[in-house]
Image (spheres, rainbow, N blue to C red):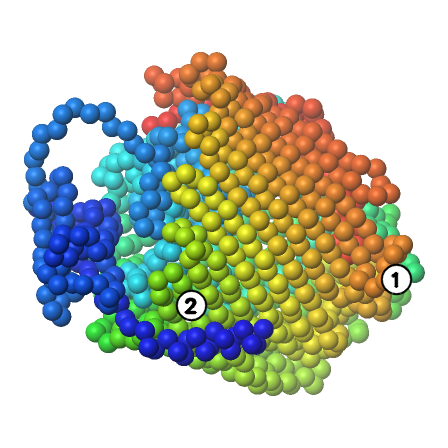
Amino acid sequence: MRFLFFIFCFVAMHVSGYGQQRQLSGKVTGETGKPVAHIAVLLKNGESRILAFAYTDVNGYYRIPVADTMDLYNAGVEISNLQYHVSKQLLQPDKDVYDFNLSDKVISLPEVKAMNRPVTRVGDTTAYNVNFFARDEDRNIGEVIARLPGLSIGEDGMIYFNDKPISDLYIDGDNLMAGRYQIATKAINKNMIKSIEVIQHHQAVKVLKDRVMSDNVVINLVLKDENSTHLSGQAMLGAGLPAQWEGVANTMMFNRKFKMLNTLKGNNSGVDYSGESTQFGAASILETEGNTRPSPLLSAGTVGDPDIPRSNYFINRSGAATANILFNTKNEWQWRLNFLGHLDRNKLAYTGFVENYFQNDTIRYSEIQNAIRKKNAISTVLSVRANRTKYLFDNVLRVNFNKDRNNSQMDLNGLGFGQQLRGNVTDITNTLAWIPASRKGVWGFNWYVNYYNSPQTLAVDEGLNADVLNEGKTFNGILQTASIPTWFSHASITYRPSKSTVNAALQAGLMNEQQDLNSLLLLQQVNNVFTEYTHDPGNALGWRRSRIYLNSSYYLTKKNWQVSLSVPANWQSIRYMQQEYKLDEGINRFFVNPTAKLKVSVAAEDHIELSLNHTNNLGNIAGVYRGAILSSYRNLQANDAELQERSSSGAKLNYHFQRSITMFFLNGEVKYNRVKANSILSGIITDNVQRTILLPYENDQSSFSAYGGGSKYIFSLKTKVSMGLLFQKNWYDQFLNGERLPFVNNTIQLTGGMDAKFWNRLTFAYNGFAVWSDSRLSSKSSQGSPLASKALRLTQRVTLGYSPVKSLFLTVKGWETYNQRPGLRNIHYVFVDANLRYKMVKWKTDFEMDLTNLGNIRRYEYFSLLSNRFAANSFNIRGRMAMLKATFFF
């Protein structure tokens, strides 16, 4: 691994002999002074041969890279278009900016019939004609996007391009949704959109365009009428049995200056709105800023959600409201407001049976839970931005408040009790970026500040595990409190010189993190007096971390290859202390975390990419607290190790094949990663309680994966087909009941899909995946061990649609799951739903009837297998339902 890094360093140091490309740029406007978008600007030599060309963006700007080897004698920049008179400017020495003001040309053409191509590609932008790919039964633009080859939409609404998550979704060039684009794809009518653009290598900051390499992919929804002032939307009301209701109201307006999308929703019919609060890309923002936000310390200790469509088991009463407003001023300033409010109350009832396998023992326990979960959330984003070719100013303020309540009635191994989990989240962030350009280079100033706190309280109304918690004495209840208020700041300055043989950047930054972990475990004695847990005084741990870093990065492009190298060096200083344990530790470390990437283009749209990385890091406050925390009713956690130090090395090889016009996409990837740490998590499991502690032992984990997938659109059949194959292998150790157990997990996953329409009346869609998994000890003694197990899971979804007349649609959906594990009975379920919809065009209204779970399945079981732990769970789910809905469009 180090040898490969030296190779990349050698390449980066020896590229100074290569010349720099010249760049021509300018702005194109019409007679009225408005920018002319998507028009070709040609660079021609003295013999009128085209040497290079570019297209103007939505603001009329263009950039043409010019190689040093080009013969520019008598060359000029020219615009020739049917709508405008030809305009040409000869190149002049020491001048690289050529602006054009075009005059309109009136011509007479014979009557022709316009034939729009379904797919067009210009540079890194591929545009899909919505009219070609949309169907009469489509309700929103998201259904069209999901049908395009190379694109897919996950269950959470995240969009993928060739199996890579997109960075964001724009509406006519503007980022209205601030990462929550899943709301827009469900609300925007397909009739409002002219084309769907997939923009690869997108650089959102204009001043960094052609200066900073970007692998980002964004989707841009191009409006049919970018000057519309028409308020549009929809209103839906539905009611059904048993006692079901749903209501939705959306309003939207999109034009160049003003964009708005507002929603109001409510239901008790199994529709979950919590996913709308997910900001796609937020995790990567935290990682980029270095904000190691602590995870919640307490939980209800409940099982995860069942692996079936959420609408089948989500017994709820929910409401949500969003407001998204964006305003562009004449002087290129942009103001944006995003608001989201969410209310939810849902029930979960399950019965679980768990087996924990050891070399010479098996520990089993059973539990029953009936939970009522409530959540209130408010999120607000205020943004002001000026994104110009000479500078960027961007300030974003995010304010999030969450309130969670979980009330559960439990039964653990025949002992009944109740528990209440309370949690509140305050999350306030401000991000400021100022990037001005000068003749000598581009400076960047960034400041990120975050306050985060999520205090929690867990109350149990029964004295559980008296031998562990109360020295064997009977007691009445437990109260655990925990919080980690956190202040984090990250300030950095970056310089990118203009005149350099390679694109280079130097960045210096300072990070500060201040946290205080406070927890207290109280026991309610038989006299109803609360006393502290006697084995330790709890936690009042102070934590301070400072990081100073210097990062030098280099990027070079030559013909069909690109190489990039980043060498960040950082110094970390950590101090954590608690007087009760006489704990006062200080740690100083110097790390170098290099990354390198080599990208070779093997065709116009195909490339092979190799990336390498090595990272050193230190743990966080969650790994050094000494006092015991009852993280759930059956899990007691503490630590007995020094601060964890981790090093990670990884390599990834990716092949990307793309034929945009014929709509054929392939993607292959091989990846290996190895992590070394100086501590390992140890668990001690008994019939009623699990104690977890971090121990000072070396810990080595490795993973390997190989993936291949692709999709193709068959124009003659108007059909999309897709397929993927994944293999994963993981090696890791676990300490369980005093034994160190080396595990190996293998997973093979096969996926396939098809979406077709026949005879303009019949539609067919299929999605399926099969997963084979096994878990065993890596030693030879694993043969015949209870720790070795295998499982098979098969899931299939089929949708059949039939339209006997233009305005009537009948849809039947089937969902099948099959689970197999040696030694257990097979589990097999089939769910069937039906929908009948009639479009009354004159009234601009759709009438529909929904029938769900026609088989009236009211209980669902599934198995889960992880290392040495097997769980069999049974859930109460929704039975048969019927709803009538009316949707009015305006």
**In terms of secondary structure, where does tag 1 sit?**
helix
* Residue at 28% in and 29% down: 115
Identified by mark 2, the residue type is: Val
- Figure label count: 2
Q: Quadrant of the C terminus?
A: top left
Question: Measured from the top left, where is residue 842 in percent x and y?
Answer: 34, 16
Q: Secondary structure at mark 2?
A: strand
* Residue found at the far right of this picture: 360
Mark 1 residue type = Ser
> What is the number of the mark on residue 781?
1
Residue 638 x %, y %? 73, 70
Position of residue 222 measured from the top left corner of the image (x, y, whole percent)? 31, 41
Distance between the Cα atoms at labels 1 and 2? 47 Å
Residue 528 appears in the picture as rendered: no
Report the front residue among 622 and 414. Answer: 622
Give the answer, above or below, for where 11 lies relative to 558.
Answer: below
Label ID, residue 563: 2
Say whether residue 96 is visible: yes
Q: Is 583 left or right of 211, judged from the image as shown?
A: right
Above or below for 561 versus 501: above
Left or right of 764: which side holds 139? left
Q: Quadrant of residue 632?
A: bottom right
Given residues 351 and 12, the one toward you in this image is 12
Quadrant, the N terminus = bottom right
The one of 600 and 783 positioned closer to us in this rendering:
600
User: Of residues 132 and 635, which is closer to you in this image?
Assistant: 132
